[in-house]
Amino acid sequence: MTEFTQIGKILSGKYVGRDVSVRGWIYRKRSSGGVQFLVLRDSTGTMQVAIKKENVPEKAYHDADKALIESAVTAKGVVKEDKRAPGGYELQVTKFSVISFSEPFPITEHQSTELLLDLRHLWLRSQKLTNIMKVRQYLVNYLREYFFSQGFWEVAPPIITQAGCEGGSTLFEFKYFDDTAYLSQSAQLYNEVFITALEKIFVLAPSFRAERSRTVKHLAEYWHLEAEEAFYHNEDNMKLQEELVSYACQKLAKNHADLLEFFKVKPETLAKVSPPFKRMRYEDAIDFLVKKEVKKKWGDDFGAEDEEILTTGLEKPMFIYNYPKEGRAFYMKVNPENPKTVLNADMQAPNGHGELVGGSERIWEYDELMKRIKEEKLDVKSYQWYVDLRKYGSVPHSGFGLGIERLLKWVLNLDHIRDAVPFPRTINRVYP
Ligand code: 4AD
Ligand code: MG
């Protein structure tokens, strides 16, 4: 059986003079004076292969001539250093065959965004999306690595649930046999169960939000990295978050400068992301906006423009904490020093990239939780198991949720969150 060498390895320069086989897809092609110059692409890079008429059988040359862009092919030959070739190396081909001929590829230069989204199944192989998928994997890997280094356990909560976590308006409801159920908005309520066994846990799973908003920051399906920690207070929770995000940013900067540069992100900028992050009380954020002549009063939410004003020019994310209780989720611990507020914090990305993390200390006493559930007019029956936790050895605890696509959007400075996920689901798209 033929052994194939990855293009990325050849581009490292260690294969000059060696006879190797490569396989992949035709990325570009041109011909000149009896030579077919193909640029081949595999998962590791692109390189030029030169197919000279006199060096290969007639059928091979004919096939190379006929094969359109995106045809899948194999080529064997000797690696030569060549300054003119993109990447600096060229394969001088002695054997060439086509695995499958491509039809004319429907994506050419300067396509509309809508067309590229309709053809996402074909566009995913573009350099941009390929590189985003690579950065995403590294990012997720570093986030996980950080949790493991701190003694966290990774857990597996359900996706099908009956207890909404973040309010009814954004639940996807569906028929569950003879009953009704929802797609999970957040694993949090289950995470609070796991900590009674494992103390510090995290989970990476899809979350679903029936968001009616058409913004560059909202998906209907996104990947949610959530943590829950027994005995942590709000301040411990924020520390954990800033260390987690800093660890991943610094690792990316150190190990993947090439990928970052593809997105014109300076590794030095990410390397500077380190604790502590700036912390601003909700009420101070309101004052800050008012001083900038924004019409805001205590109790208002922050819109995209407010977030932009608050975070423009920051070198690293910041926290806004102690929001008004009114409008916050039922499970958030009330701030004993100011009962109109809760012990929560949102981590905001620099330059208006939006909220990266939402977290809080949780109500851990039975009576207080029951009171909030009733105040919010939630169906006590669906939450009974959650409230039960407060009866059997409840402890103070905190947790948070980080949107992977939000983090990736900020780290790579992407215009739109949909490019941070392979198959974006939004209010107007579930295809392909
Ligand atoms: O602030 P959220 O709604 O918080 C929760 O769900 C908590 N129960 C998490 C927890 O404490 N375990 O969502 C958390 C994060 C947001 O900060 C944001 O990064 C991301 O999830 N997120 C979205 N990402 C993409 N599209 C959406 N529609 C998102 N909604 C939230
Ligand atoms: Mg939030």
Image: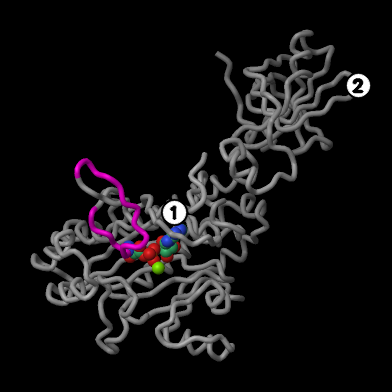
Label 1 sits on residue: 220
Q: Image check: 186 left or right of 77?
A: left
Q: Quadrant of ligand 1?
A: bottom left
Quick one: quadrant of the N terminus? top right
- Which of pointers 1 and 2 lies earlier in the amino acid sequence? 2
Instruction: Read off the magenta span.
Output: 162-178
Please name the residue shown 28% across and 83% down the image. 335
Please name the residue shown 56% across and 85% down the image. 294
The x, y position of residue 170, in whole percent, is 37, 60
The x, y position of residue 430, in whole percent, is 48, 44
The x, y position of residue 4, in whole percent, is 59, 23
For label 1, being within 8 Å of ligand 1 is answered yes
| Vertical order, 310 against 377 (above or below) | below
Badge 2: how crowded within 10 Å, few (<14), some, or many (20+)? few
Q: Distance from label 1 to label 2 (Cα)?
A: 53 Å
Label 2 sits on residue: 33
* Foreground residue among 419 and 258: 419
Examine the image and state in which quarter residue 7 appears. top right
Q: Is residue 148 magenta?
A: no
Q: Secondary structure at mark 1?
A: loop
